[in-house]
Amino acid sequence: MIPLRSPDEVMRLSRLGASHQTRLSFMRTLLRGLRRGLWKIDRPLWQIDANGVGRAVYRARGDGQCYSLVAFGHDLPDHLRSDRVIAEAWDATFALVDGEVTNADLDRLAANVPLQEAGRVSDRELVLSRANRSVRLWDHVVARLSNGRQPDAERVDNIGYLMRTTAVYGSGKFGAADHAALRGRPLFDGPFRAEMLAVWLIRSFAADLVEHLAERHGGKKAARLSRDLRRRLGVGNSTGLGMAPFLVNHPGLLNAWIMARETALARVRSLPVSDEASRTGFAKALGCMHVHLSSWHTTHPIQLSKLTDLRADIERISRRLEAGILQGPTPWNALWHWAKSALTTEGQEMLVSIMIEPHGTLVDDLVDTMGADEMASFKIDGLIPLTELKSLLEKRYAWTRTIDFAAQEACARFWYVSEAKLEPRLGERHLEPGAALEQPLDIARSVSALALDLSATPNTATIAAFLERHPKHRRIIRRIQMSRHAPYGEIRDNLIAADLLPIDMLRCKLAFFGATRFDPRSDRWLRITMYQNAPYPDELHAMLDDDWILSQSQKTNECLL
């Protein structure tokens, strides 16, 4: 097989920040699993009044399991609606519960879930979330449907969602069940499956709620959303710095995600020929991406530049395709080698997604490799001689030698956790107080400090002997040892530099979720869309596996990615 791309190429922030969803992304793999496992989803409870206040339950059952999304609707004044994590009230709040819910459960959750972090949840809860209505679209849709009319299709496509989540907490946060509780369960034994299920069901709640309010306001003349427009509505999300440290704190998991994607790319590139089905699928995916770019809006200068690059790259790929590049030997590898010199970084990473797309039978098994037991390599092997440690430094961390940490710009930032919200934040070291509370995300600087102390220690010493004299290096030595089995586990950039763009870290993680339409609002937070064009529960089993990501609008007959 053709070798995988080097970590030195793949793990730079400029490339990670150009990531796109693929068929291995978590939203897509969840829906494939729900369909193949013949899961059934229903709504056993709907107690919502004409103002959208009340509660509802969505239930998913399959593979001997049951999960219940409990949704609470609130009457939120406009002046309290905010994307900020410091908000204390929302249009809707949610909890995904392990199993059926009783009336006692509903009462307990009603007293706590609307409070979010200020409340208490039990280890039966898997996910805690909240969402706000889209100010730009919600009232328009309710008004149109109340009068028996469909909302404006162009407006629906431009915004793309009725509700936007501002947090989706899981994996043990605020008392919820740890991910280990789901290990070994069908469908859920993989990263972020519970969170992805919660968001998919939240999308159903938003669509059901807008139709309910239209009916209560318009009576018999009210209309329901057309199936086409309904499907074109996803779930929005606002994500900030709280997500960024995850990629640093979980090198084993990051390695598993990147390794799966890179293995998929290498498998496709290794194919000796292309068949008609894969060429047709590639052309369809390329066309859908072309249309998708027309509805991907942003005002951020960095993303505007990337969109310009993508539109030009799409045209370049189309011309290359028309020239017959997929007709010759090892066609996918030929296409890739051409792309490395002809396309921008953004275009190359888009091409990764499109090349993988029509090869499900070749790559979908890699989904089962995207989890990681990070405790398996947590123990430091103190018997290893320093020669081996130095060799690992040379192999995995040579990139740190080019950084001069004596320069102010190289250590201009520091990561800390806010006292008010227990959320990660980024401070300016030379302008703000608080560096004494710095979180250990300064990987490159820690490696540099370790290398300095190693240079003054004989090679014959062991790691144990070295740590006896220099215990401050335990954390970074553990990380370096982990890199033996995780070549893609380290972001190869300085994460405390003045020119750091945290949105690159956010986009990398969100692309693996399956997010689209990345819209940075600053260098520290962005908005995305999730599940746009995906099936709803009532149509899950009527649609082909994964066909939704390449679905067509019935009205315009255009692809929508």
Image (cartoon, rainbow, N blue to C red):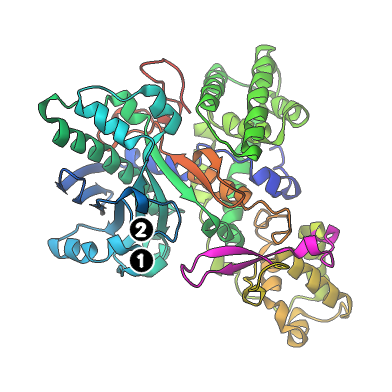
Residue at 57%, 50% in the rendered image: 506
Circle 2 — which element? Answer: strand
Which residue type carries mark 2? Val
* Quadrant (top left, top right, bottom left, bottom right) of the N terminus: top right
Residue sitting at 63 percent across and 23 percent down?
Answer: 314
User: Does residue 238 appear left or right of residue 205 in this picture?
Assistant: right
Whether tag 1 and tag 2 are in contact, CB under 8 A, the answer is yes
Tell me where residue 372 appears, x and y as whole percent.
53, 59
Tag 2 residue: 127
In the rendered view, would you say 60 is above or below 402?
above
Amino acid type shown at disc 1 = Ala
Quarter of the rendering containing residue 481: bottom right
In this rendering, would 501 be left or right of 386?
Answer: left
- The residue lying toward the viewer, choosing from 164 and 103, is 164
The numbered disc on residue 176 is 1
**Label 2, residues with CA under 10 Å away: few <14, some 14-19, many ≥20:** many
Q: Position of residue 50 (x, y in %)?
A: 16, 43
User: Residue at image x 28%, y 62%?
Assistant: 113
- The stretch in magenta equals 400-428
Work out whether residue 422 can be spotted. yes
| Spatial separation of the CA atoms under disc 1 and disc 2 | 7 Å
Q: Position of residue 521 (x, y in %)?
A: 55, 45
